[in-house]
Amino acid sequence: MAFYLDTSAVGPFFIPDVHSTAVEAWLRTVRPRLVVGSFTAAEFSSVVSRALRMKMRNAAEAAAILIEFDQWRAQSTAGRPLADADVNRATLLIRDFRLKLRAPDALHLAMVVADGSTLVTFDDRLAEAARAVSCPVVIPGE
């Protein structure tokens, strides 16, 4: 079984927050096949860049976080490129107004649905939308 990590699940690996302990514990107890897609990589890079702009990290810290992320992603996860079909599927998910999805979350969900993976997230709205389309969800710590 493959577990697709969205940005909210990847972030706590590299930038400590309230979810860090839960993600680390989940990974210790479950030895899943992890999938971190190219879109997650771009979105995580944006999070790090924002931390730098907001002066929450300096340039050296931001660069070190991204290097560590890139190494971890290459060594410990399967990649997943974003395809045109994913964008088309995301558009349909966004147009299902009951799901209340923004484009980035719809892209994550579209890839998970296409691959038959399990979504790993801390985003409650995304988890609710995933369940609404019968996609399995893991929220570490729950």
Image (cartoon, helix red, strand yellow):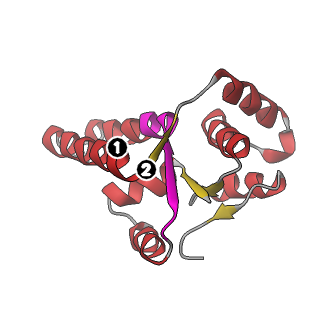
Give the residue drawn at x 72%, y 32%: 90
**Residue 63 placement (x, y as % from top left):** 20, 39
**In the foreground, 67 or 17:** 67
Give the residue drawn at x 65%, y 39%: 111
Q: Is residue 54 magenta?
A: no
Query: Quadrant of residue 51 in the image?
Result: top left
Residue bounds of the magenta highlight = 31-43
Query: Which structural element holds mark 1?
Result: helix
**Residue 117 placement (x, y as % from top left):** 66, 52
Residue type at tag 2: Thr
Task: Give the residue number, with chain letter if any, for mark 1.
Answer: 74
In the image, residue 46 sits, relative to residue 33, either above or below, namely above
Give the CA distance from mark 2 to mark 1: 6 Å
Query: Quadrant of residue 18 in the image?
Result: bottom left
**In the foreground, 47 or 136:** 136
Residue 137 visible in the snapshot: yes
Query: Quadrant of residue 15 in the image?
Result: bottom left
Q: Any mark on residue 77, and which?
A: 2
Give the residue drawn at x 32%, y 55%: 14
**Residue 130 placement (x, y as % from top left):** 74, 53
Give the left or right position of residue 18, taking residue 6 as reference. left
Residue 120 visible in the snapshot: no
Q: Residues within 10 Å of mark 1 (few under 14, many from 20)?
A: few
Whether residues under marks 2 and 1 lie with C-beta atoms below 8 angstroms apart, the answer is yes
Query: Which structural element holds mark 2?
Result: loop
